[in-house]
Image (spheres, rainbow, N blue to C red):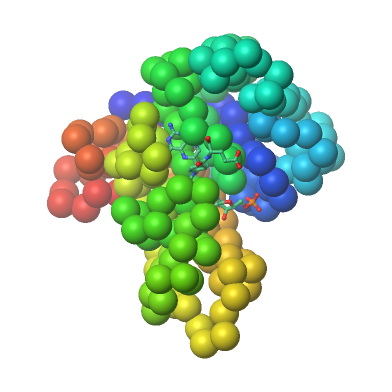
Amino acid sequence: MSKAGRLVVLVSGSGTNLQALLDASADPSYGARVVAVGADRDGIEGLARASRADVPTFVEKLRDYATRTDWDAAIAAKIAEYEPDLVVSAGFMKILGPPTLTAFPLLNTHPALLPSFPGAHGVRDALAHGVKVTGCTVMLADAGVDTGPIVAQEAVPVLPGDDEAGLHERIKTVERRLLVDIVGRMAREGWTVSGRTVRIGNHTGGEST
Ligand SMILES: Nc1nc2c(c(=O)[nH]1)N[C@@H](CN(C=O)c1ccc(C(=O)N[C@@H](CCC(=O)O)C(=O)O)cc1)CN2
Ligand SMILES: NCC(=O)N[C@@H]1O[C@H](COP(=O)([O-])[O-])[C@@H](O)[C@H]1O
């Protein structure tokens, strides 16, 4: 059974999911704390949020490395410096390779109901398809793109006149609550993975979370 007290959170943008985790971890009973924040780019609000919270940060830019393999090795090594129990991808916009995936559990949050609309533009793609219901997904990442086992999902209605930004903000309100809940439960209760089923705690019933 895995536990998740030490979190490294990876961001690429505004970091509102990160901020929700920082706020939650201020309560010692939450059971997890953000020990570092990493990014693939600098000058983003997510890094500023970490600095304001006195959390160490690091940036590993793909363009600084000769190959993607070199970048994969570098970001995995940087993550390892902080000895995380769980890495949380919260708006991190790079696919992570085997050096990270084989060393740490990677929890990812995605603004669509996987397996629908995977990838970097889930909200845009769902809206373009004309769905009436979308949502968010928290999953354990594997080597694929948003193909890992699903931990939790929550639906969000698409409203008439929604544009991508407005729908995404509505999704993020739900997503932040879901991510904070799941990370906290994983940290306090641990989790197991059996095939595509993730069980948090010692549940032996049919539920998957
Ligand atoms: N091994 C994995 N790593 C990551 C996953 C995953 O499922 N497996 N999820 C992503 C987050 N994500 C969706 O939730 C996602 C983010 C970005 C992309 C993507 O196509 N990225 C491109 C570059 C895009 C850019 O730089 O703007 C790329 O990596 O080449 C797909 C899915 C986090 N990591
Ligand atoms: N496919 C990855 C992806 O689209 N991730 C999404 O980026 C947003 C980041 O918001 P934040 O930086 O304010 O937390 C979140 O909605 C997250 O699900």
Q: Position of residue 185 (x, y in %)?
A: 43, 44
Q: Identify which residue is drawn at 59% across, 69% down.
A: 164
Most extreme residue toward the front, as rendered? 66
In the displayed structure, would residue 112 be above or below residue 47?
below
Q: Identify which residue is drawn at 34% across, 47% down.
A: 151
Q: Identify which residue is drawn at 48% across, 71% down.
A: 127
Most extreme residue toward the bottom, as rendered? 160
Q: Position of residue 123 (x, y in %)?
A: 51, 63
Quick check: can you spot residue 10?
yes
In the displayed structure, would residue 73 be above or below residue 190?
above
Q: Position of residue 72 (x, y in %)?
A: 54, 18
In the image, taking residue 157 as reference, residue 53 lies left or right, namely right
In the image, taking residue 152 as reference, residue 4 lies left or right, namely right
Please tell me in which quadrant of the rendered image residue 191 appears: top left
Q: Identify which residue is drawn at 42% across, 19% down.
A: 98
In the image, taking residue 129 as reference, residue 60 lies left or right, namely right
In the displayed structure, would residue 209 be above or below residue 190?
below
How many tags in the picture? Answer: 0
